[in-house]
Structure formats: C-alpha cells, structure tokens
Amino acid sequence: MTPSLTAARVLLDELVRLGVRDLVLCPGSRSAPLAYAAHELDEAGRLRLHVRVDERSAAFLALGLGKRSRRPAVVVTTSGSAVGNLHPAVLEAHHAAVPLILLTADRPPELRGVGANQATQQPGIFGGSVRLALDLETPAEPARQAATWRSAAGRAVAAATGALTGPGQAGPVHLNQPFRDPLAPGSDDPLVDGGEAGAGAGGGGGSAEGGDPVRGRPDGAPWVTLPGAIAGPVPDGHPPLANDERTLIVIGELPTPGLRRAALDWAAHHGAPVVAEPGPGTHDLVLPHGALLLTAHAWVEAHLPSRVLVVGRPTLGRAVPALTRRPGVRVEVITPGEPAADGWADATSTAAAVHPVSALVLDGDPGPPADPSAWAREWLDAGERMAAALDPDAARAATAPIETGVPTPPAMPAAPTPPAPLDAPTPRATLDGPTVAALLNDALPTGARLLLGSSSVARDWHLALPRPRPDLDVVTSRGLAGIDGLVSTAAGLALADPQTPTVALLGDLSFLHDAGGLVIGPDEPTPDLTIVVVDDDGGSIFTTLEHGADALAAPFARIFATPTRSDVAAVARAHGAAVVEVRAAADLAAAVSAAPEGLRVVRVPVDLHGRRSADQRRRDRVARVLAQPPSA
C-alpha cells in the first residue's frame, strides 16, 4: 500500500472512530488518496459519502450536516483554488459556532513556492476563522507517522465540537494533508479491505493502551478518548444571574437550541419579557413582533428597562443597538463561549457586565416562577396590542383557516413555462412576504424543521408571526447573515436528519446564489427537501433602508434592487428539481403541508415594490396604537 493511501485510510478511519458520519468530497487528483479511502468507508457502511462538484456548495452542505446534529462533517478538496472556495462556509461556521472539518490535500513542502501547478500557501489560509489549523506531515513512513495522524484527528474533533470548552466554542477546523506521488492505489491494493484502515499496511510502534497506530486501537476505540457531549443544555459552574424587575431579555443568534431554551427558562422563572429573533421554541413572555415594538421610540422611552440582558448575538435590524445605546439602560451580555476573536456580543460597546451562559442555569430547587412585575406586564400588554393592530398585515389570503394535512400539491406541469420577454409586464403577485411566512407557519407538517434565509425572509417571519408554532424547529444561518450557501445548508440539514420534514424559505437572490447546491449526482444521497422561493426579482430588503428613499430612486433599481429577470423555475428544473409555482394561499399551503419527498422548489412570486411603504405603515400603526392608553 502506498504511503499516501495509508495516511488517508488512517486519518479517515480515526475520524470515523471519533464519531464523524458524513464526508463531502470534491473531485481532484491530489486528494485522490482521501477519495479512495472515503469510498472504502462508504462501501463498508462506516461513513456516508456525498460527492459535489462545487467546493463552495460542498462546504455549505457539510455545514448544514453539522448545524443541528452538532457532529462535524468533513469536506475534502484538492489543492489550490479549491481550498479558497471553502472560505465563505468557514466564516459562517466560525461566527455561528458550527462544527466543521476541512480536510484539504496539498502538494508536498518541496513544491510550495517554486511555481508548481495548483500549489499555494494553504497552511494558515483561513487565518483566525478556524479553531485549529494543522499542517500534517507528508506521508513517507506510515508506521512511524500514523500515531501523529490519529492524534491530529482527535485534536480536530475536539476543537470542532468544543468538547473541552463548550458548544459555544465549536467551529471550523483545518487539516492540511500533503501527499506525494503515487496517489492511486497500487496493483496489490484492494479497493475495499473490509474496514480495518491499515489492513495489510504493516505494523507500528504500538502503545501502552494496545493496538498499533496504523491499524488503530482494538474494538474500534479512538486513539484519544474525548469527553462526550456536555450534560444538559448548558454547563454548570457560575453563580446564577440575579434578577431585576425591569429586565428585558434579547435573544439573538445562538449555536444550539439548548442555549435558547435555557434563556427562555430563565425568563419564564423571573417573569421577564423577551425580544427573540427567529429560532426554535417560544414562550408566553416572548413579545410578539418584539423588534418592531422597539421601533416605537416614544413608548419605549416611557417604559425603559433598567437592564437589557443580551443572550447571544442580535442580527436583525437596528432597534436593539439603538436600545442598548440609550442612557440609563444597563446592558449585560450572556456569551455562549464565542471564540476569543469575537469575544462577546457588544457591537455598541455599552456592556457593563459579561456572564457565561452557565449563569442562566437555575438552582436545583429555584422555587415557583415569579409573576411579571407591573412594568413587565406593560411590555406584555403592549406586545399584545401591537399584534392585534398588525393582524391585517399578517392576514391569510385564503378564505378559510389553513389546517395541517392539506392534500399534496398537484403534479408539476409536463413542460416548463417559457420565460417572459424582458419587456413583458410582470404578472401581479397575489401574496407578499409576511403572508407567505404566516402560511408556512400554519401549514408545515408537525415537528418540521424550517431553514430561514437571510435578508427579507427572516424579517418577514418576525413581522408575520406574533408567536411561531412551538413545534417548529426554526434554523437560521445568521453567523454572518449572508445569502450564500443556503441551498446547500438546507440540503445538509435534511440529509443529517431525514426523519424530520425539512423546508427552506429563501429569497430569489439567495436561491440563485447557491443554485449549484441543486447539482447532485445520480449516485449521491438526495435530500427530501422543499425550498420555498419568495421571488421578487431582486433585493427588496434595500427598499426598507435609507437607499430606498424616493430621492434615490434613479440609481436604486440598478445598484440595489439588482433585478436579474431569471426564471427561477427553469433553473430548478434544469438541475432536476421538481417545481411547483403558486400564486394563491391555498396552493402554497398544499405545497408545503406534506412531508417533502425528494428535492422540490416552490416558487412564490411577490411584488418588490410596496415593501417600503408597507414597512412604514406598520411602524406608524404601532406608534398610534401604543400612544393610546390600554383598554381596561
């Protein structure tokens, strides 16, 4: 067996022993040893292999596989520019604390910096965005080197999962493995050896614990034993956080559902109102449309909290930063243990105290929950009044309530609809973004998982729903809140947990940006995934910002709205996805009410124009309602 293939087998065998179950492979010659080893493990049933032709999409697929499972997936690439294409997913995983292992093949050191083909400085290429970066030794003497490879795999999994530091420290890890020729198996190398990574490869020095480094420890044990998952939603070890009767809790992006539950439990026990970004779970103390309530500046000024407790990292809008800048408001931050590069979430530099997430852990017998204070009841009442006032904006276009379990949608048309000429008028949309969000909340199957895209759709979800259904697992990619890689992330979520119905809600630009994520070979695992595309032919989010003002209308369409006139349905069909196009509420409900089977795109045309005025109408309505005294 060649040294390169032995190294690849040892490294992947150890990663599997440590709990890795998915590997995303991009084709390449320098990475061939890893490809052969991954194929062997897939054939032996020890690893699930996913082959993708686009490294950027591959990395986001791996990110999606690890986002809810908290088990790192491995993405393998060849050397050169292929490695650079992993960077967007690395940044998202870094900021969202998602476990991810990047295993990049490289030229040996003697071919770096001398003009060799497809050779660049891969060690350190991701800078401070990875938890660990190791430039592994070039395979030459496997019996001597194998223990180092196995130990490196252990270090990689520990760093990627935060096994020694906590889930908030999870994130991407880079293993750079140089290979020398020969890269293909020799004539005496079986393509499948029955599972033992080093079978027939020769022995090694062994260890006191038994097993030699090439073959690994007996009974499938890992070379280095790591601690298991942290018990409970958060670790213990910090004094419980003191209560304040005028505390407002803001829940932002958090790496695990358990951390969000801990924050909601603390709020419930202390009777504190909550402004929560989209995510799993809810509670009666979560303020309907909370971020919008914060824009009612006069009302907020008259009901200022004495303390704002920020849990995680707020990402939606400017209302929370504006609140934390107000004089007289003490800001305290709960950090889930984000990397030292980020520290804690305090974009306004106003935090007076920072607490670890363990401060949210309630004592063993915390006593009965506290009733909300008079101040807290005023906030809760304001939230309910605002929700009632906004009900027309979230009204369903259907004439009857939508029930879960509506019959499955009709079969897709036999022939695609040809794209309209560029000068043809756009058909009038009958739905808008918030209505689409409300319909999905009503119609998705029980216990479904929903990936919310960035930009407008996440805000639409927050606007449309006073309180989302508690059984829905709402997932966001808000590490950097980018629009890239969302199709692949959704596919990863669906593949990681096939038993949970998975739906993604994306804008048209997000969909087009990662349309390559639909490219799945005929021999690859295909996700059961429905992607709902809210298609307004452009970036409507900018209409709600200062760039959408009437005075800037002349340049707006070209440099911000960026219409593409792309045929979303045709793009989806070209990549083999089934397509359903809907314009009515009942049709949309039917399209998403059943658990997805295969890959399907549901296109919903909406109107880009009018979003700015609708947004201002909501704000004005909220201000008017809250200016009135509450009814007795």
Image: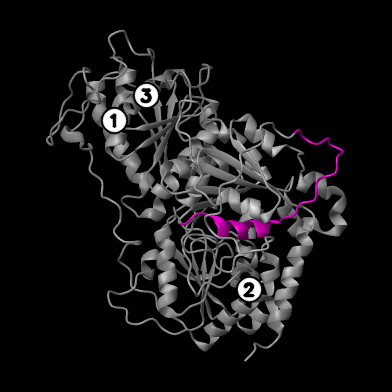
Q: Nearer the viewer, residue 233 or 43?
A: 43
Q: Residue at x 41, y 83 (%)?
A: 370
Q: Residue at x 28, y 27 (%)?
A: 10
The image quarter in which residue 327 lies: bottom right
* Secondary structure at numbered mark 3: helix
Residue wearing tag 1: 13
Q: Is residue 41 visible?
A: yes
Q: Main secondary structure of the magenta part?
A: loop
Circle 1 or circle 3, nearest the eye: 3
Q: Is residue 338 above or below residue 48?
A: below
Q: Earlier in the sequence, mark 2 or mark 3?
A: 3
Tell me the CA gap for discs 1 and 2.
54 Å
What amino acid is at disc 3?
His
Q: Tell me the crowding category of disc 3: few under 14, some 14 to 19, or many 20 or more residues within 10 angstroms, Cα based.
A: many
Residue 293 within the segment the image draws in magenta: no
| Place of residue 419 in the rendered image (x, y in percent of width and height, measured from the top left) | 77, 34
Q: Residue furthest bottom?
A: 632
| Place of residue 450 in the rendered image (x, y in percent of width and height, measured from the top left) | 52, 52
Residue wearing tag 2: 387
Q: Nearer the viewer, residue 411 or 632?
A: 411
Residue wearing tag 3: 39
